[in-house]
Amino acid sequence: MTKSADTHCPYCALQCAMTLKSPAATAATGLTPADQPGSSPVPAAPALEVSGRDFPTNRGGLCRKGWTSASLLQHPGRVTEPMFKGPDGVFRPISWDEALGRVTTAVKDARAKYGADSVGVFGGGGLTNEKAYQLGKFARLALGTSRIDYNGRFCMSSAAAAGMRAFGLDRGLPFPLEALDTASTILMLGSNVAETMPPFVQHLQGVRDAGGFIVVDPRRSATAAFTSDGGGIHLQPLPGTDLTLLLGISHVVIHEGLLDAEYIQARTTGFDAVVRSVNAYWPERVQSITGVPAELIRETARRLASGARRGGSYILTGRGVEQHVDGTDTATAAINLSLLLGLPGSTRSGYGTLTGQGNGQGGREHGQKADQLPGYRKITDPAARAHMAKVWNVPESLIPGPGLPAVQLLKSLGQPDGVRCLFVHASNIAVASPDANAVIRGLRSLDFLVVCDFFMSETAAEADLVLPVLQWAEEEGTLTNLEGRVLRRRQAIQPPAGARSELWIMARLAEALEAPSTYSDDPETVFEELRLASAGGAADYSGIDYAMLDSGAAAYWPYPAGSTGTPRMFLEAFAHADGKAVMTPVAPRRRRTPVANPDPAAKPMTLITGRLLEHYQSGAQTRRVAELLASRPEARVQIHPAAAAAMGITDGAGVSVANERGEVVCRAELSTAIRPETVFLPFHFPELESANRLTEAATDPISGMPEFKFNKVWVRLAAAT
Ligand code: SF4
């Protein structure tokens, strides 16, 4: 039994370093699933002690999610045996042999009846690098399907597509986070790090105190409020107008001669087209579209330019500007602005996107995306296919082509040519997907749904079979944080006797399905194969191994064998063949005309969604932490007092937020932090409080990113209040 383990938080991409101390008395818990019918509660095992560990990203700090993370390990509601749902709709425990047999039969049946692509896999950005890698291989070779994608499509795909387009390579932050400490100006768009990853704020203290912190957010979030004391700027545009705002800032940079002409000439292509594309976006016109005062648009451009000449300027984007039907173009506009100012690839400035999920970076590199093979290779690239066929020792013809991006995959559930048998890993798609009601209908129409989870999440509750898996402190592995730094996850505690690693599950199923190639259940063995698979690719891990990570070495990819890794990217050249960054002209995209409001008592408004300090993603984990739930037990719709007064809504009153896709009923939180025509809902809650019942499954045509952050709704006082 390990008494103490240095590891990292199980939640977000900051991957705060922590130490887990295991009381000697703690043993394999062997919990029974107390929240399942027919089970009986068991006493909780002694808790692990969590402490923050000094590390460059968190400097010993943790947020309340991290502090309480160990409580889920001994949670009495944990699923610890395979649970099969009978014809009566009741889950009952079955043996692992029976569970694996049922999955094998379901896969074979679906393949025989409908073809290999009737089997689908939905992965997650919380999986370790090893699991993400093996899941892509398992789907394509063991299941023989092209239909694998993951929940990162909902969070990182637009910024990733924009980064690929501009730089030829996407790494969230292409510089260490500590670089922000000495910046003179930081423009942060659509990210609320003060609530989602609080220890990050340490890196903003200097720029805030110097008056150089600028935040773009339709809400006065905790991060936006952080600008005020130091004389920073909060730009509060109308939802859906971020792209226009960025074009306006670029317009000022060009027309006031604030650009870095030498850099543009030497290191970029496409400048002339971008100049033409921003001509029509002078500040007063942009003010009329976005609601942001023209003078603040000018001031933002000037501070970015002057910051670049002093301590450095950074532009950082988050989901608020990326989760749109023009999310890739919005991220591209942010990159164009950064290139005009000469920021990317310099020693003290840059552009970056803030990855959200724990392994959101690694999760998009190793092959669980519909269009990718390991090493961040395109699945349509003949050289990439040949390389992977060699690593896997299979004929190239066995590797399927591109699959369906996540939203299309979910829309295909139960359809004649769609997915009929679905595997879900590390995702709670019944709560986290856009148009969640439609997704739940799709899940219910499947022939067979198998969910790997440690709790009976809302998605697991829809399953035919739930396979209990390990939690983070019960396993070894690696993750890649928001800086592209590869980190070790270490085991601190024995898992419940009935739970298994996803690697073990894949290995046993591959065996049962007589799959080609080999599948290990040992994380280090899988990582060694991942190194070979990634060698020569964009995300090259071939120079990284467990021993190096265990010694504390800072391993930033690309890290080819024999190199020392790449903490700061693009210093010499960008990843396109000519070494230059590509500026691409972009323009706002017209959105669908909203459905007419059928309810004269309801007021049409715009819904934006986001996260709370206490909860993570769909809330499947954090809603089970007593302290977090006590602090934020329910969704509340944030609404401006003036808008609320016009509808007779008082603080705490029941409110209906509806549109053609569904309805949310929850209590009102009156706040001047929100614009008067806009409401905000957190997306951590299920059922009647599920914000994603209202979000639309319209997607960005380049990235497949859904439109989470701009949805038309009808708001009124709820009937029964
Ligand atoms: Fe965990 Fe993120 Fe909180 Fe750090 S900021 S403790 S990684 S949830």
Image (spheres, helix red, strand yellow):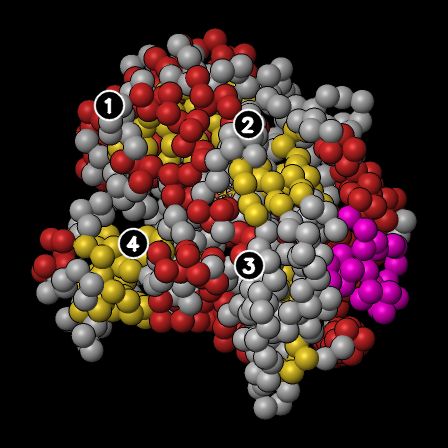
Q: Residue beneath label 3, please? A: 72
Determine whether the residue tagged by mark 3 lies in a helix, strand or loop: helix
Ligand 1 neighbours mark 2 (CB distance < 8 Å): no
Marks 4 and 3: in contact by CB < 8 Å? no
Which residue type carries mark 4?
Answer: Phe
Give x and y (percent) for residue 163.
Answer: 54, 34
Ligand 1 neighbours mark 3 (CB distance < 8 Å): no
Mark 3–mark 4 distance (CA, rounded to whole Å): 29 Å
Of the residues under marks 4 and 2, which one precedes in the sequence?
2
- Per the rendered image, the range of residues in magenta is 499-523
Please state which of the two labelled residues, at mark 4 or mark 2, is closer to the viewer: 2
Instruction: Identify the residue shown where x is 80% and y is 44%.
Output: 524
Q: Residue beneath label 4, please? A: 680
Q: Exactly how many numbered labels are in the figure?
A: 4
Of the residues under marks 2 and 1, which one precedes in the sequence?
2
Please state which of the two labelled residues, at mark 3 or mark 4, is closer to the viewer: 3
Please state which of the two labelled residues, at mark 4 or mark 1, is closer to the viewer: 1
Q: Residue beneath label 2, please? A: 56
Q: Residue beneath label 1, please? A: 231
Please state which of the two labelled residues, at mark 1 or mark 3, is closer to the viewer: 3
Please state which of the two labelled residues, at mark 2 or mark 1, is closer to the viewer: 2
Give x and y (percent) for residue 369.
Answer: 64, 51
Determine whether the residue tagged by mark 1 lies in a helix, strand or loop: loop
Of the residues under marks 1 and 3, which one precedes in the sequence?
3
Please state which of the two labelled residues, at mark 3 or mark 2, is closer to the viewer: 3
Give x and y (percent) for residue 405.
Answer: 58, 56
Marks 2 and 3: in contact by CB < 8 Å? no
Mark 3–mark 2 distance (CA, rounded to whole Å): 27 Å
Which residue type carries mark 1?
Answer: Gly
